[in-house]
């Protein structure tokens, strides 16, 4: 396991441990903190990401103070928010989580990190998900998954040459990591501070929370603020800070425990409505790749289709002879000039050319399926 992955594992583990006793559920009024020296497990909104201090308040409209007791303590319970709310009901929407801080393995210096996750959901079915991380060891790594018109692309940028994968019959968005249920949790111990705050285009109520958690392998403290929209009842902003340590965690049964220490995480989560005419644009590398293969016909009965650069591959239950016949007909219809055809048993190699471009099509059989590899090249 590389160091960056190790650090991210520590971060993820700490969040899981902290939130194991939090999560969703019906709301309840806050209780006094026990004084016997043992922190009470509490329920609180789940962390999302940051670059903003938990004390900042992005308000732009007059607010109404929450009801208080004579002692100045908020008495009104937080609302019950559906953390499974389908945000696509808001129209075109962007969900973003930023996280930054320092992470430290036992016996080693603390390392800074930055993590960004951004998802765009459009009413026409198009989607995008960007995951971007920065660390001293790996530098900038960005992975962008895009679904446009049923076609899925994954664009990877790191210290190596950027590349794009075009994939068919793959759903990268059915289990989104940026759903409210994955990031928020309930507001059972948050305190109402003010009403009528305008945030991200929504009228919201603002809450604050503080939490301490301690288990055999983890201890930590969190504090932050939540802005909950009044209509619909969803969390549209969530900021905070977590400070804690983890030790003795075995990621899988039988493995040596992962000694480590988590120092500090700050996060910021936002939901923003986008305009009705918002669209998603393919990364340039993906757009060029798509254009290069636009005049390469594909049979209808295929699976596991992948395109990367100048290579296209797929599988089909059609016979090799049927695939060869398809390309001999359809490539010519697309303006390609047929070249040599070679046969080795049930394997074939076909060649075509057009306007200074060459295409080789390899057809073979494996595991009762016909495998096709198409190679594009310039003359």
Image (spheres, rainbow, N blue to C red):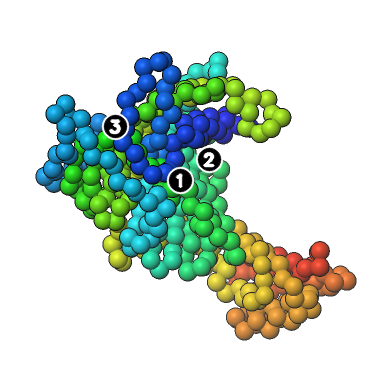
Q: In this figure, which residue is indicated by the disc labeled 3?
A: 54
Measured in 3D between alpha carbons, the distance from the residue under mark 3 to the one under mark 2, in whole angstroms, is 33 Å
| Mark 3, other Cα within 10 Å: few <14 / some 14–19 / many ≥20 | some
Residue 343 place in picture, x, y as percent:
84, 73
Residue 209 place in picture, x, y as percent:
31, 32
SS for callout 1: helix
Of marks 3 and 2, the one in the foreground = 3
Q: In the displayed orientation, state which residue is furthest to the left.
A: 62
Up the image or down, 313 lies above or below 210; here it is below
Which residue is located at x 13 percent, y 43 percent? 64
Nearest the eye: 100 or 329: 100
Sequence order check: which comes first, mark 3 or mark 2? 3
Quarter the N terminus occupies: top right
Which residue is located at x 40 percent, y 49 percent? 83
Based on the displayed image, in which of its 4 quarters is residue 329 positioned? Answer: bottom right
| Mark 1, other Cα within 10 Å: few <14 / some 14–19 / many ≥20 | some
Nearest the eye: 246 or 132: 246
Which residue is located at x 16 percent, y 32 percent? 69
Measured in 3D between alpha carbons, the distance from the residue under mark 3 to the one under mark 1, in whole angstroms, is 20 Å
Q: In this figure, which residue is indicated by the disc labeled 2?
A: 159
Quarter the C terminus occupies: bottom right
């Amino acid at each position: 396991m590389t160091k960056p992955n190790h650090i991210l594992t520590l971060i993820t583990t700490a969040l899981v441990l902290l939130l194991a006793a939090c999560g969703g559920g019906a709301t309840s009024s806050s209780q006094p903190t026990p004084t016997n020296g043992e922190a009470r497990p509490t329920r609180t909104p789940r962390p999302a990401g940051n670059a903003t201090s938990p004390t900042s308040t992005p308000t732009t409209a007059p607010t109404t103070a929450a009801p208080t007791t004579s002692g100045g303590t908020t008495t009104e319970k937080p609302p019950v928010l559906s953390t499974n709310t389908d945000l696509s009901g808001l129209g075109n929407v962007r969900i973003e989580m930023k996280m930054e801080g320092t992470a430290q393995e036992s016996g080693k210096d603390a390392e800074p990190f930055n993590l960004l996750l951004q998802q765009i959901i459009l009413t026409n079915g198009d989607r995008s998900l960007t995951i971007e991380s920065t660390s001293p060891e790996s530098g900038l790594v960005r992975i962008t998954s895009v679904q446009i018109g049923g076609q899925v692309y994954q664009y990877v940028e790191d210290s190596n040459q950027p590349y794009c994968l075009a994939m068919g019959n793959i759903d990268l968005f059915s289990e989104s990591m940026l759903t409210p249920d994955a990031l928020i949790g309930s507001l059972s111990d948050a305190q109402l501070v003010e009403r009528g705050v305008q945030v991200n285009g929504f009228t919201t109520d603002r809450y604050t929370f503080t939490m301490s958690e301690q288990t055999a392998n983890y201890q930590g403290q969190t504090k932050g603020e939540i802005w909950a929209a009044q209509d619909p009842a969803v969390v549209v902003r969530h900021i905070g800070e977590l400070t804690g340590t983890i030790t003795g965690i075995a990621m899988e049964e039988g493995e040596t425990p992962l000694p480590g220490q988590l120092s500090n995480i700050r996060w910021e989560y936002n939901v923003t409505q986008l305009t009705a005419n918002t669209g998603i644009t393919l990364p340039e590398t993906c757009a060029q790749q798509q254009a290069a293969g636009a005049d390469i016909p594909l049979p209808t009965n295929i699976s596991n289709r992948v395109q990367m650069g100048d290579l296209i591959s797929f599988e089909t239950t059609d016979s090799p002879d049927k695939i060869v016949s398809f390309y001999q007909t359809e490539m010519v219809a697309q303006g390609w000039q047929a070249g040599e055809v070679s046969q080795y048993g049930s394997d074939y190699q076909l060649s075509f050319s057009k306007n200074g471009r060459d295409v080789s099509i390899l057809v073979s059989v494996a595991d009762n399926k016909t495998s096709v590899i198409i190679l594009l090249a310039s003359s």
